Amino acid sequence: MSWWIRKLINNPTGLLGAVLVLGLILAAIFAPYLSPYDPEKADRPNRLQPPGSEGHPLGTDQAGRDLLSRTIHGARVSLVVGFSAVIAASILGSLMGLLAGYFGGWTDTIISRVVDVWLSFPFILLALTVNALLGLGLRNIIITLILTGWVQYARLVRGEVLSIKEREYIEAAKALGQTTGPILFRHVLPNVITPIIIMCSLQMSQVIVAEATISFLGFGVQPPTPAWGNMLSAGRDYMMSAWWMTAFPGMALALTALGVNLFGDWVRDTLDPKLQN
């Protein structure tokens, strides 16, 4: 652990990314204590107050809700969606990739064709279909992102397993009479964990931006629940008169994506042996 910390400290961009990611996590966890107001409570007399107004450092929105409170609480949605969708998609995709790469034959053909068909669906079309069938809400956003993300892990793991299953220690395990389950989860899976972790770290920002896109289009998290996407959508009609309604949620989203990308690049550079000097 100390080696990781030293390596991170010696990498300025990775350290910046880690700080931004840590800030997102802390904001999400302590949102009720950091927020000066209830993020969903309207206050019509104080609507569209500019930044720096008394009691509202980032101003208020069209319903008089405190923008600082809503931006902080919006981090919770991003964190829940990001971690839930990435973890679930990586588990599902890795399992499919393990089966396809190890067994080959019809198993590989079927899973590979499903992956090819799945990749042919546009993301927005799939999101609309899922929400039309299941309804709106945070849970269905997560389901949508899992359904669109698992295929990348399946392709990655399948390629790794095709190489690993031919190595001597796998043949030795078979010769000793080990069954398929132990071979897959004791010998094969540990050797593909590193690329899975790298992909998880790099995909996190894509998932967070995708959630904001879905909410921006109106079939994600619904108002008055604060999410950066629906806050940006609400601010479209006030771009000229109340620029802060889009500026601050957009800035929070951009900094989060930047931080996750920088930290993900550092994780890739640290774990990928091909990039070692």
Image (tube, rainbow, N blue to C red):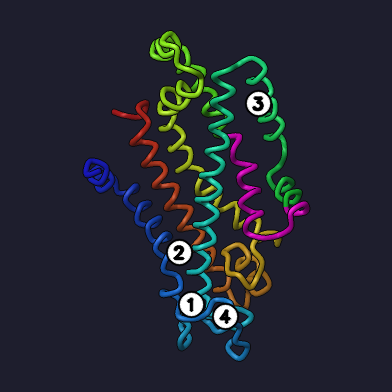
Q: Which residue is mark 3?
A: 111
Residue depth check, mark 3 versus mark 4: number of the one nearer the observer:
3
Within 10 Å of disc 2 (Cα), the crowding (few <14, some 14-19, many 20+) is many
**Looking at the image, which residue is at 67% across and 17% down?**
106
Q: Amino acid at mark 3?
A: Ile
Residue 45 appears left or right of 10: right
Residue depth check, mark 2 versus mark 1: number of the one nearer the observer:
2
**Looking at the image, which residue is at 53% across and 72% down?**
70
* Label 3 – label 1 distance at C-alpha: 49 Å
**Number of labelled discs?**
4
- Asked whether the residues under the numbered discs 1 and 4 touch, taking CB atoms below 8 Å apart as contact, a structural biologist would say no
SS state under label 2:
helix
Question: Percent from the top left, x then y, of residue 262?
Answer: 40, 47
Q: Which residue is mark 4?
A: 65
Q: Which residues are magenta?
A: 131-152
In the rendered image, the quadrant that contains the N terminus is: top left
Magenta residues: mostly which secondary structure? Answer: helix
Q: Amino acid at mark 2?
A: Ala
* Label 2 – label 1 distance at C-alpha: 18 Å
- Asked whether the residues under the numbered discs 2 and 1 touch, taking CB atoms below 8 Å apart as contact, a structural biologist would say no
Residue depth check, mark 3 versus mark 1: number of the one nearer the observer:
3
**Residue 159 sits above or below residue 252 on the image:** above
* Label 3 – label 4 distance at C-alpha: 48 Å
Q: Amino acid at mark 4?
A: Arg
Within 10 Å of disc 1 (Cα), the crowding (few <14, some 14-19, many 20+) is many
Q: Which residue is mark 1?
A: 58
Q: Amino acid at mark 1?
A: Leu
